Amino acid sequence: MLAQVQVLHRVSELPARNSARSNDSLSAMFDMTGATMMFRRDEEIYGEGENAEYLYRVKSGCVRTYKILADGRRQIGAFYLPGDIFGVDDVKTHQFSAEAVHPTAVALIKRSIIETRVLRDTTLARQMLNLTMSELHRAQSHILLLIKSARERVASFLLEMASRKHDDSEVELPMSRQDIADYLGLTIETVSRTLTQLENASTIALPTSRRIILRNQAALARLD
Amino acid sequence: MLAQVQVLHRVSELPARNSARSNDSLSAMFDMTGATMMFRRDEEIYGEGENAEYLYRVKSGCVRTYKILADGRRQIGAFYLPGDIFGVDDVKTHQFSAEAVHPTAVALIKRSIIETRVLRDTTLARQMLNLTMSELHRAQSHILLLIKSARERVASFLLEMASRKHDDSEVELPMSRQDIADYLGLTIETVSRTLTQLENASTIALPTSRRIILRNQAALARLD
DNA sequence: CGTCAACTTGATGGGTCTCAATAGCGGTGG
DNA sequence: CCACCGCTATTGAGACCCATCAAGTTGACG
């Protein structure tokens, strides 16, 4: 799946979701020893079933993890924005694949190096545990999301995206409607229709399809 | 929520799901220092928002973790059978509540003791990480479950339950239809109807409502 | 201004929920 | 032992939400 290099959105200076807890040792490792790689739009970062050799941190851009089901449906597990660490799927092999949503810079650390350090550095060990727990927490929230109605899912998604920015009153979405749909377990048509509904209700505004202004966050939270 | 003490099912000698990976140090701690507590049917083991003070292992019976949403719906996060370790919700406070499905014996260890030991025992640290990762893996599977159709969800559920027994050709369900429905994100009516469908198709047999014989596992796996 | 991809909008059907009634099962007491 | 009770599970009818299929619109780029 080739893709031309094009910088559509510069999503930067976002507070990293999973760097909320102290990631000092880990952050230091990414800054010091971490090599950087660039990925084009839709380029694969790792595939499901591959050995989990690295841990990754988004420097710029956006990453999606996903799984393709037997019938061809795709479920997106998470979106990772600048500062977020990803690749903590499982001990041995990745349970999900990872792709760049659009041109993305990623820092990598070899897991083997972390494994070695962890034996001496209990702080790092704690950070790895915290990181995994925050991923667990995220997955649990995703479960709660998937049992809600379409409107509730879309509202939750918008609030989640907004909460990961400094200015949470509007969002520049890095991902397509198809990505959103596959994350929420809906179709693109339903996502689109729901957004239109919310716009008609003056809950949001859609200057462009990717830019969403949250005009009534309380109303969104009520749906959520 | 009072409940009479009654031993309905003795589910024992099941291979513990999350003890597959080496849990030697942790197992030893449960065996040695672990106190045992009994819980009646529907009795709360811990509540959402409470401090996560202990780690638990099921000795006999069955435990469900769940969360009540704003509108009153209940989502069950997981069922834990004998040998399973639970209570690894998050660092500080529990994200879910935990209840005994029916009379249940549980072993407990104080987290503070684990925390202390982890600083010296890297094996234990690794086990805690593995435990959290296996919970993460479970949650991710649950996400994939919730985007499927009702028939697929029920089929997956039956196969999952069967795989956690020695004899995987029939299952004695410890939980009610309501529990199953809240785990699968369906209504009891849909669960019941789907089971009847599967019975009519000779895929399963239902001698009693709690006992289910898997007559055609291949067919179930095809739905899954 | 033509082309292509992404998004939106429309019409229709199906799967699951809701509401309601019936059936089964275990426990209790006459 | 059987009638009765309460709870759980099953079955039925109708409504609703979302998926599907299809057509139209918008915006980016040559």
Image (cartoon, coloured by chain):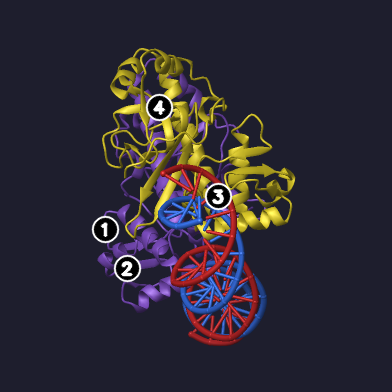
Chain colours: A yellow, B purple, C blue, D red
Please tell me how crowded label 4 is: few (under 14), some (14-19), or many (20+) other residues with Cα within 10 Å: many
Amino acid carrying label 4: it is Val
Chain ID for label 3? A
What residue lies at 42% left-to-right and 50% top-to-bottom? A75
Distance of label 3 from label 1 (alpha carbons): 35 Å
Q: Are marks 4 and 2 in contact (CB under 8 Å)?
A: no
Please tell me how crowded label 2 is: few (under 14), some (14-19), or many (20+) other residues with Cα within 10 Å: many
What residue lies at 48% left-to-right and 29% top-to-bottom? A84
Q: Do labels 3 and 1 share a chain?
A: no
The answer to whether residue B86 is above or below residue C23 is above
Q: Mark 4 points at which residue?
A: A106
Q: Do labels 1 and 2 share a chain?
A: yes
**In-image side of A22 versus A120 (left or right):** right
**In-image side of B58 versus A10 (left or right):** left
Q: Do labels 4 and 3 share a chain?
A: yes
Q: Could you say whether the residue bearing mark 3 is in a helix, strand or loop? A: helix
Q: Could you say whether the residue bearing mark 1 is in a helix, strand or loop? A: loop
Q: Could you say whether the residue bearing mark 2 is in a helix, strand or loop? A: strand
Chain ID for label 1? B
Q: Name the residue under label 2.
A: B213
Mark sitting earlier along the chain (1/2): 1
The answer to whether residue B166 is above or below residue B169 is above
Disc 1 versus disc 4: nearer the observer: 4
Q: Name the residue under label 3.
A: A145
Q: Mark 1 points at which residue?
A: B167
Distance of label 4 from label 3 (alpha carbons): 28 Å
Residue B19 placed where, x, y %?
33, 39
Depth order, front residue of A142/B165: A142
Amino acid carrying label 2: it is Ile
The answer to whether residue A5 is above or below residue B60 is above
